[in-house]
Image (cartoon, rainbow, N blue to C red):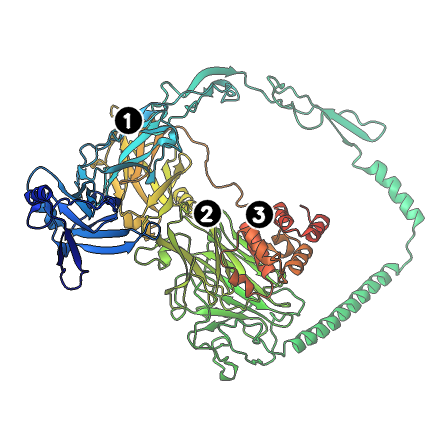
Amino acid sequence: MLTLRTRRAEGSCPLFILLLVYGSSLAEAAGDYSEVLPDSFPSAAAEPLPEFQLEPEDAFIVKNRPVQLRCRASPATQIYFKCNGEWVNQNDHVTRESLDQITGLVVREVDISVSRTQVEELFGLEDFWCQCVAWSSAGTTKSRRAYVRIAYLRKNFEQEPLGREVRLEQEVLLQCRPPEGIPPPEVDWLKNEDTIDPTLDSNFLITVDHDLIIKQARLSDTANYTCVAHNVVAKRRSSTATIIVYVSGGWSSWTEWSECNVRCGRGWQRRTRSCTNPAPLNGGAVCEGPPFQRVTCTTLCPVDGGWTDWAKWSVCGTECTHWRSRECQAPAPRNGGRHCIGSVMESKNCTEGLCARNKKVSIEHASHPLEPGMGVAVYAGLVGALLLCGMLLLCVGVLAYRRSCRHLRGDITDSSSALTAAFHPVNYKPQRQDNPHLLHPSAPPDLTATASSLRGPLFSLQQGVVDHSHHKIPMTTSPLLDPLPSLKIKVYNSSTLSSLELPAEGASVDGEILSLKMVGSGSRPDSREPHSHTLPREPSNSTSATLGCLGGRLTIPNTGVSLLVPQGVIPQGKFYEMYLIINKWEKTTLPSEGSQTVLSPVVSCGPTGMLLSRPVVLTLPHSAQLDPLDWTLTLKTQTHQGEWEEVLTVGEESLSSPCYLQVEERSCHVLMEQLGTYSLVGQSTAPQPACKRLQLALFAPQAPCLSLDYSLRIYSIQDTPHALKEVLELERSLGGVLLEDPKPLLFKDSYHNLRLSIHDIPHSHWRSKLLAKYQEIPFYHIWSGSQRPLHCTFSLERGSLAVSQLTCKICVRQVEGEGQIFQLNTDIQETLPPHSPLPSGGTCGPSSQVGPYAFRLPASIRQKICASLDAPSSRGCDWRLLAHSLGFDRYLNYFATKPSPTGVLLDLWEACHQGDADLVSLATALEEMGKSEVLVVMTTDGDC
């Protein structure tokens, strides 16, 4: 036996090679690789052949990263790798040795690294391969070959799917041949960026050739389909194939014949049918034939009756009367005409009244003879009584005047009743003088009292046009209030009353002059004061109400904007005229910056300087598509200087956050203790782009159209009630008519424009003036909200005035995104009935509700719920469980800092359920908590 010992390079473990020399075996080993190692040796009888516990596996080199090959065998004296028939240098091996605790045999493990260069240097058709060879005293064992290949994936698909229009329930085949690659790429199909799983939807089938089969096309299968190929190197996406599942229209049944359109004479009757059985959808064929039929009708004209002339008076009778008559025969009523109105006979005294009057007068004179001088005494008594009443009224007026003057000697404002953000406590006592506007404390506030002028940043109170220095009121250097349009903010208690007028929205405080009306200050109206007028306001976008300690609710109808002022927010004895305004976009700086987008209207509520004892709830509609939640939502407020600042970001709240934001599917509710100007903005959260809800509204001129030109306007607006209301008011002023309900569209943050095109125009009667094939609205204009409302106009021209029927198709879609189709079939000479998607009569209630009528939950029930849940419970059955049941538990620390967490939760519940506030939902949450005693109270006192 010959033993050869060699040592590896520095830093490696020693290598022992045992060479057992036998004649035939040595010759065979020398023939294979004589200079390094023999293939096999005679084994000792006591040791078995090596057995591989881990064999090298196939690997792929991604870019320039080397791969590791590993094998492990036992029992093994040595293990080496052989690659492509050549032994790997022993210095490239990393060997680890251990002892099997069960069998006591030696276990060896070897790693080598294969680089991209080694693989690329191999010439020939065979792939690069490596295998392990293990030795023991019994002989050698070889592992399986592990192939190492360079991974890649080509860019271009061999075949990409093609989009098309298919009818309902038709089979659809989308073919896809992925790019060449090693390893062979796997293929997935996306439907509107969602992975298709045939196990979840049996209507889809993916073949072994990677084709997608839609067995029966459904309306929900109208989408964008993408073939995605991927392996360990990269991922490739095919071009998007848009599948539109259309439905051809079918006629409904004819309606009943209408009444004849004229009351009498020759007219026509009409009956209609609609192409709604089914309605054409997604470009499906419209119904053939007329949508209405007309037939002539003839109706006899009704003739109203008329009186003949009066006949001659009869002879005077024994009753001192005579009479005359007339007949309803000029003409007589026929064919349903009205009968004559009035009497047929008429009588009167024929002796000029002498018969009855002489008898009556003679009786009166006989019964009541007047004594001389009696009339003078009666008149003298009446005059004395009137003088006495006048003196009494004068005394009462003097007493009332002195009492009112005594009350008005006090301070005009104090630190509790003034707007704390703009006033410091001050004592201001004007000279007593006759003022027709002085009020008794119990009198209601007078909003037309005389005004004094304020100028920023230091303000002074003026008396007429003369500046009395001893009447100046010191002010802070900060602006008095945010600039707001056409509003009077009144603050008064039992002894003071003041009113404040604000300039137009968007104006700065320093550049505008505010008019402060102080009742009882001695100021008088003066036409020479240039700034004492009240600026106009838009009632459709604003509301106001005078609220006290009982609270209330302000709502701007048909906009989704409201402000809930809970009971106890305003201190006892104080009254504020609170306002709520939706700011005009053209007069407001946008709160968005960078990639952010405006999701809600910019809303101002105030007065901004008032102190709130507890949070109010501001409700804003938004246009964010929250499913899935790919948004980073931020609430912003506008400072006095007109700049926007972040208030909070959803999901990043802390104990220092001044607000709480409850986000729902179409609106958000802000719990806040500082009134001002607010708006909700958002931006996409990587890696998925967010989607914004839009509405597409189609308008046309009112009928009848007397010109050859005809235009169609399509608006792209946010999917909020306020945005739609704004467009409807604009079109109403332009004389436009909404042709059908607005269509929804999800607009993706993908930097692609919105494309609008018109198709299928009957060119024999109509001509389009649009030179290009389509129009586009830039992505940034829609996403940032910098231009509102946005619209495109399609100008058409008809061949003659006799052409009245217009049929066409208007397609609106985001490039490489979703789209909508308007199928138009209208008679431009037919007057359409007024149509509005907004609810008639505004919202569910009045724009302002004051006191208990503004709240669904009675105060007695509310107090008992708060008393039961405010105190912490060791079992957790307290306000925290109520927040969880109502879905308000995203950040409980906000409610924990309030004196009554339950009360704030109930305020938020009132705001979230403004339109459908039902005590049953709240009772269900309390029942799940096991609060039976509260349920008894609600059943007794409430109406659930």
Residue 1, placed above or below residue 11: above
Which dot, 1 or 2, sits closer to the camera?
Answer: 1
**Circle nearer the N terminus (2, 3):** 2
Q: Position of residue 574 (x, y in %)?
A: 61, 67
Residue carrying label 2? 666
Q: Is residue 764 left or right of residue 684?
A: left
Quadrant of residue 213 within the rendered picture: top left
- Which residue is drawn at the image coordinates 63% and 57% (left, top)? 851
**Circle nearer the N terminus (1, 3):** 1
Residue carrying label 3? 845
Assign a secondary structure to mark 2. loop
Residue type of the residue flagged with mark 3: Gly
Asked whether residue 847 is in view, the answer is: no
Asked whether residue 225 is in view, the answer is: yes
- Distance of mark 2 from mark 3, alpha carbons? 20 Å
Q: Residue lying at the far bottom in this picture: please name it.
A: 470
Residue carrying label 1? 173
Q: Position of residue 374 (x, y in %)?
A: 88, 59
**Circle nearer the N terminus (1, 2):** 1
Of 885 and 425, nearer the camera is 885
Q: Position of residue 875 (x, y in %)?
A: 62, 58
Q: Is residue 378 left or right of residue 391?
A: right
Assign a secondary structure to mark 1. strand
Give the tally of numbered discs.
3
Q: Are marks 1 and 2 in contact (CB under 8 Å)?
A: no
Residue type of the residue flagged with mark 1: Leu
Residue type of the residue flagged with mark 2: Arg
